[in-house]
Image (cartoon, rainbow, N blue to C red):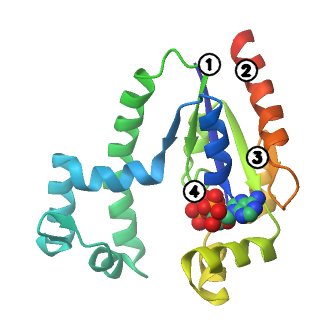
Amino acid sequence: MLLVGITGGIGSGKTTVCKIFEVLGIPIYYADDRAKLLMHDNIKLVAALKEAFGEEIYQNGQLDRPVLAAKVFNDTAKLEKLNSLVHPAVAEDSVNWQMEHLDAPYTLREAALLFEVGTYKALNKIVMVTAPLDVRLKRVMARDKVTEEQVLARINSQWPEEKKIELADFIITNDGQELIPQVMAVHAELMELAVRG
Ligand code: ATP
């Protein structure tokens, strides 16, 4: 089974690109969305989070994200604790998900921090979506109704583009030039790899 990762900085358009792969019938594991879901639904994880961060992080059975975020903000040890609880749950969930898609030619795993948290090492190929900084700033400011400074702070917490591009196997440039032909070309190469084994 060919396991492919797809990533890109904030506002690069990785979710938009994933929608095109979905149309092509490729199953996509959205790691960040799944993590959020597991923090609600995985009984073991919920219990561990309550023990580590206090019962108050859940209100009426719902995770109170701002309360949890305030606890880990600027506290590396707590952030590491949070990751050490969430990552194994996501890893287990993604293996189960993978087993449900054994008939696919390849699968995609989408994550914003694929390189930063080291997940890329367990994948066979990496697709990186990239776009110029000014374009990303404009997109995220419009989408999330936030200031340029807020977007820049998020961008600066991620690895620089150059470092990620070096480690990627395929680059999709989402700067306004046509996106679908680029996705089709990457898909064709991945299908070829999948067939060759
Ligand atoms: P994040 O990491 O913040 O979730 P992302 O990399 O997944 O971002 P998207 O959500 O796909 O990025 O795109 C960011 C915004 O830019 C969205 O509002 C999307 O509709 C828009 N966008 C993406 N690509 C294009 C494009 N080629 N042309 C116009 N708008 C685009």
Q: Which mark is residue 105?
A: 1
Q: Position of residue 131 (x, y in %)?
A: 79, 62
Please, what secondary structure does the residue beneath circle 3 have? Answer: helix
Residue bearing mark 3? 167
Q: Are marks 1 and 3 in contact (CB under 8 Å)?
A: no
Q: Residue at x 65, y 37 (%)?
A: 21
Q: Nearer the viewer, mark 2 or mark 3?
A: 2
Q: Is residue 129 left or right of residue 64?
A: right
Q: Gap in Å between the C-alphas at discs 1 and 2? A: 7 Å
- Given residues 60 and 128, the one toward you in this image is 60
Q: Is residue 59 left or right of residue 182?
A: left
Q: How many marks?
A: 4
Q: Gap in Å between the C-alphas at discs 4 and 3? A: 13 Å
Q: Position of residue 133 (x, y in %)?
A: 79, 73
Beta carbon at label 4 within 8 Å of ligand 1: no
How many residues crowd around disc 1 within 10 Å: few (fewer than 14), some, or many (20 or more)?
some
Please, what secondary structure does the residue beneath circle 1 have? Answer: loop
Q: Gap in Å between the C-alphas at discs 2 and 4? A: 25 Å
The amino acid type, in three-letter code, at marker 4 is Leu
* First in residue order: circle 2 vs circle 4: 4
Q: Residue at x 23, y 55 (%)?
A: 40
Q: Is residue 25 left or right of residue 84?
A: right
Q: Are marks 1 and 2 in contact (CB under 8 Å)?
A: yes
* First in residue order: circle 4 vs circle 1: 1
Residue 166 to residue 69: above or below: above
The amino acid type, in three-letter code, at marker 1 is Pro
Q: Gap in Å between the C-alphas at discs 1 and 3? A: 23 Å
Image quadrant, ligand 1: bottom right
Residue bearing mark 4? 113
Residue bearing mark 2? 191
Q: Residue at x 62, y 40 (%)?
A: 5
Q: Residue at x 53, y 31 (%)?
A: 27
